[in-house]
Amino acid sequence: MMREAPVRGLILRLALPTVASMLITAFYNVADAWFVGRLDTQSVAAVGVAFPAMAIIQAMGFFFGHGSGNTLARMLGAGDRHGARRMAAVGVVCSALAGCALAAIGLAALRPMALAMGATPTILPYAEPYLAVVLLGAPFMCAALTLNNQLRFQGKAALAMVGIISGAALNCLLDPLFIFVFGWGVTGAAAATAIGQAVSLALLWWLNRRHGVVPVRLRAFAPTRAALGEIVRGGSPSLFRQGLGCVATAALNHAAGPYGDAAIAGMSIVTRLAQFVGSALIGLGQGFQPVCAFAYGARLWRRVYDGFVFLAGLGGGFLATVAVVCWLWAPEVVALFQTGDAEVVRIGANALRWQMATLVLSAWIVPCNMMMQAIRKPIRASLLAASRQGLCFLPSIALLPMAFGLAGVEAAQAVADVLAAALAVPLTLPTLRALRRAR
């Protein structure tokens, strides 16, 4: 199938369940924001303040998942099943241990962490308990995301989707129960997320053992220097991309802070909406990555190029449609996540329209990053991953508010998208030309 099936159909076959998995992963944040939005502005802002912690936990899961997954896909393409089994065990165990480390460090420095991520004195009482419960769930989230991605790289994207959806469905059921019935407020939203992730991990583990191409066996855990090096090379772009999302959101919270809790809440809503939409494109890209990694390992260069072109075109059409809808009905979209605060809706609608103006550029940025990551060009992939929310966004969020005030905060991501798209041209075009000429 990976060698001979038509590239477009193969990518769609792998991407559709992967898109669902990515949307569900992002849906944890959106669901929390929607239910918490029934409470008050400070609770909505608290979820936004804690978002960088969620981003770094997810970054660690994607780091080990993409690093081990890319490598085991290439090993399967080269016929090395034993090496693939070893890589699967190293990825999952190391991911769980990294989640434990994140939880321990975060809980030991809970208040300084909340303040560093942009909590104000009025938001801090809501942010601290939410953040504490999120950190307790870090080992489950890291390991679940790693297993999810390993299944996807084995061509078992449908199984990966089932595991993720189960946890998300439970999260949606528990959110109203914990928040409103039990009266736990914003802390209840975090508890629902942590329990949902634990259930996802348990189901993914079972599915992987029963139906995976390379089931995870703990006795195969052998963290050699070579294996860890492969994870670092293959997973660093994901770590940069997701990790810089953590730094970017914290910087955004600090930039919005001088304009009040409503500004933090409004930007928090837009950040989650943008991440939710972007997750669909990343899901498409992750459907492309196994095809790309396998084809590259098998020296089928033209399949890599054809897959890239298909991904960029499909993603561009999807993002253009979403951008038009969200631009026209921006206030109504933001109002879905906030009750009773017109200032939150006004700020959020302005920021959403700015982001929609450049959204389609991600259909070029993301495929470039995904391809470079899958074909083992880690330096270019890491630069591309770091560009949108790091190299380009951090200067934008630092400089634009100084010149334009709140409008600069709202427009910072759009400016960063333009700069990141421009940077991707010289980093990617030479490789694309080489792949197109190859036979």
Image (tube, rainbow, N blue to C red):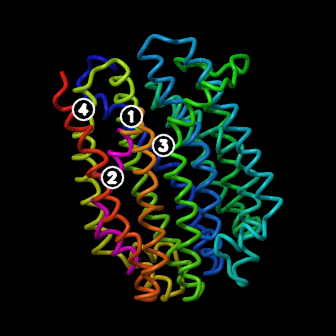
**Which residue occupies 29% across, 66% down?**
358
Disc 3 target residue: 21
Residue 158 among magenta residues: no
Residue at image position (59%, 69%) is: 250
Q: Earlier in the sequence, mark 2 or mark 1?
A: 1
Residue 129: image tag: none
Say if mark 2 contacts mark 1, CB within 8 Å: no
Q: Earlier in the sequence, mark 4 or mark 3?
A: 4
**SS type, badge 1:** helix
Question: How much space separates mark 1 and mark 3, taking CA atoms?
Answer: 15 Å
Of the two numbered discs 3 and 2 on the same chain, state the one appearing first in sequence: 3
**Mark linked to residue 365:** 2
Which is nearer the eye, 97 or 423? 423
Q: Position of residue 406 (x, y in %)?
A: 45, 86
* Total tally of numbered discs in the picture: 4
Disc 4 versus disc 3: distance between alpha carbons? 20 Å
* Element type at mark 3: helix
Q: Which of disc 1 and disc 4 is earlier in sequence?
A: 4
- For label 4, the SS is helix
- Identify the amino acid type marked 2: Ile
Of the residues shown, which amino acid type is indicated by label 4?
Arg
Residue that badge 1 annotates:
289
Amino acid at circle 3:
Ser
- In the image, the segment drawn in magenta is 350-371
Q: Quadrant of residue 285?
A: top left
Which residue matches tag 4? 8
Distance from the alpha carbon under mark 3 to that under mark 2: 21 Å
Classed neighbour count for the residue bearing mark 4: other residues with Cα under 10 Å, few (<14), some (14–19), many (≥20): some
